[in-house]
Image: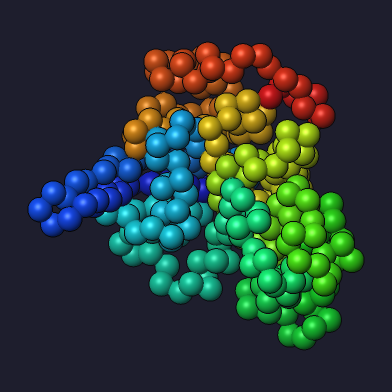
Amino acid sequence: MTFILKTEGLNKTYRLGGIVNAKQIQALNDVNITVESDKPVVIAIVGESGSGKTTLAKTLLRLETPTSGRAIVYDEVVAGQGAIPNKKDFLGLVQPIFQNPFEAFNPLKRLDRYLFMTGRHFAGAADAAAEQAQAERALRQVGLSLAEARGRFPHELSGGQLQRVAVARALIASPSLLVADEPVSMVDASLRTSIVNLFRTLRDELGVSILYITHDLATAYSISDRVVILRRGQVVESGDARQVLDHPQHPYSMELKGAVLAPEVSESGSHT
């Protein structure tokens, strides 16, 4: 079995204020997560604002350094002591999908340049023809084409289209894990289902695992195989998604479930 995700005593403490009146905030508190699988999975990290979800995502993406403990992705240490030292090797294993696609791209830079540069630096593209071929293939995988992105600036696409370009850019590097931090919260409700269904396709057809950070229990139920529920930086419940979400044991998990007023049905017919 492969450790798709494993955290061992992961802690992150922020120091706020001056020297005299410094205050410490424990964003992650002894977080231990184990997800073993021989096939790709979607892992939902669920919790309200301030639960530590985004700090966990940033730690896995090396945007934050853990105070102690470590994180393992596909049997490689990515954060903490013994982490992969080479940034290129790391980005070939883990790629981010950020919450707001309009903040993920420089508004003055054309989108195709992002795609071509990713192919050159992380996928071994030897020339312009190879860069274009890789970009076209990745865009096709998310339901777009290079013609729709070529020469265009971020503001010229809709939020849903731009989020798909962000996913395509990540796919060019052939990662094993996508870390998606609230990836549907900034798109219209009508587009959320299409993004969620895209993640299903990436798991089932491309063999990519996804860490899906969300406060939305409905979409987590729709696509996740495993779920981890965070509260104030601590794991309060984790396991098989259906078991945890259908039969929550912790009072906080019950509270989150109770906040979902009614189930909806996605385009694929599964409950959300």
Residue visible at 77% across and 77% down? 131
Which residue is situated farthest in the left direction here? 20
Provide residue 210's location: percent of width, then percent of height. Answer: 60, 46
Q: Residue furthest bottom?
A: 127
Q: Which residue is rendered at x = 66% and y = 14% of the image?
A: 262
Quarter residue 168 falls in: bottom right
Quadrant holding the C terminus: top right
- Viewer can see residue 174: no
Query: Where is residue 138 shown, x and y percent of the image?
Result: 78, 62
Position of residue 17 measured from the top left corner of the image (x, y, whole percent): 21, 52
- The location of residue 55, given as percent across then percent down, is 41, 47
Q: Please indicate whether residue 228 sits to the left or right of residue 154 in the image.
A: left
| Image position of 173 with respect to 142: above or below | below
How many numbered tags mark residues here? Answer: 0
Toward which corner of the image does residue 144 lie, by quadrant?
A: bottom right
State the residue at coordinates (68%, 76%): 117
Name the one closer to the observer, 18 or 219.
18
Q: Write the residue at 83% across / 81% down.
A: 129
Q: Is residue 264 visible?
A: yes
Nearest to the observer: residue 177 or residue 184: 184
In the image, 23 versus 69, the foreground residue is: 23
Q: Is residue 95 above or below residue 132?
A: above
* Of residues 32 and 165, the one drawn nearer to the viewer in this rendering: 165
Looking at the picture, does residue 183 appear above or below residue 87? above
Q: Is residue 44 left or right of residue 254?
A: right
